[in-house]
Image (cartoon, rainbow, N blue to C red):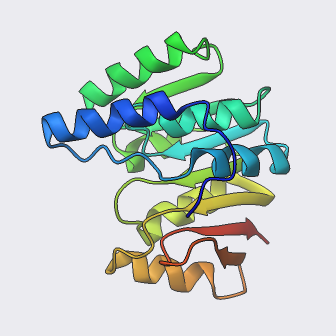
Amino acid sequence: MARTSADPCAHVREATLKHRLKHGCGAYPYSNGPLLSTIAAAAGAKRILELGCALGYTSLSFAHGAPKARIDTIERDPEHVRLARENIAAAGCDKRITVHEGDFAKVLPALEAGYEMAFFDGNTPAPALHQALRGLLKTGGVLVTANLNHGGTADAVHAALFDGKSWQSALVDDDGETAISVKL
């Protein structure tokens, strides 16, 4: 997918790629932060939830697009949590972005519902996590789901997003990796 605007968070994306190569870990930054910034701005998001923080690239992208939003992001890898918090503080966003350390399934129940936007980029999407995200989103809230081309449980999430009953969804890339959905 071609980027349509400059990426003010590109340095964090590049640092994430270098970190992954050096450490052989699963820190994969999303391919298009400016798209996420634009969606957050268009949604008028005041609260954003992210599953899969890595080193903070997408959290900072959301903060750029929705400068008044509060962002909760979840990451289980302690080293990634530390690096994300450093990157977020260096960008001056540590008062607006909270990095929760732990597994998604354990952290999500502790969060208060009412998000206008959620982003899933934590490996293969799972139906139970998407049900939890649905419960945390407001009606009309926007869900961006990455990694829908991973097969397995991602296929079940894809089917649920496109069933037309709970979500209005569209794919936003040619390889079927990312869907944007609105909670009905």
Question: Residue drawn at (35%, 30%), measured in percent from left and top?
Answer: 15
| Residue toward you, 85 or 116 | 85
Would you identify the image quadrant in which residue 156 lies?
bottom left
Give the camera-side residue of 110 and 181: 181
Looking at the image, how many numbered discs can be counted on the residues? 0
- Whole-percent x, y for residue 62 in the image: 65, 38
The image shows residue 73 at horizontal and vertical percentages of 51, 36
In the depicted structure, whether residue 152 falls above or below residue 110: below
Percent across and percent down for residue 34 are: 65, 45
- Which residue is at 63% across, 71% downward? 172
Residue 76 appears in the rendering: no
**Left or right of residue 68: residue 48:** left
Instruction: Please determine whether, in this image, residue 164 is positioned above or below residue 90.
Output: below
Residue at 57% over, 52% down: 119
Is the residue 150 above or below the residue 112 in the image? below
Which quarter of the rendering shows the N terminus? bottom right
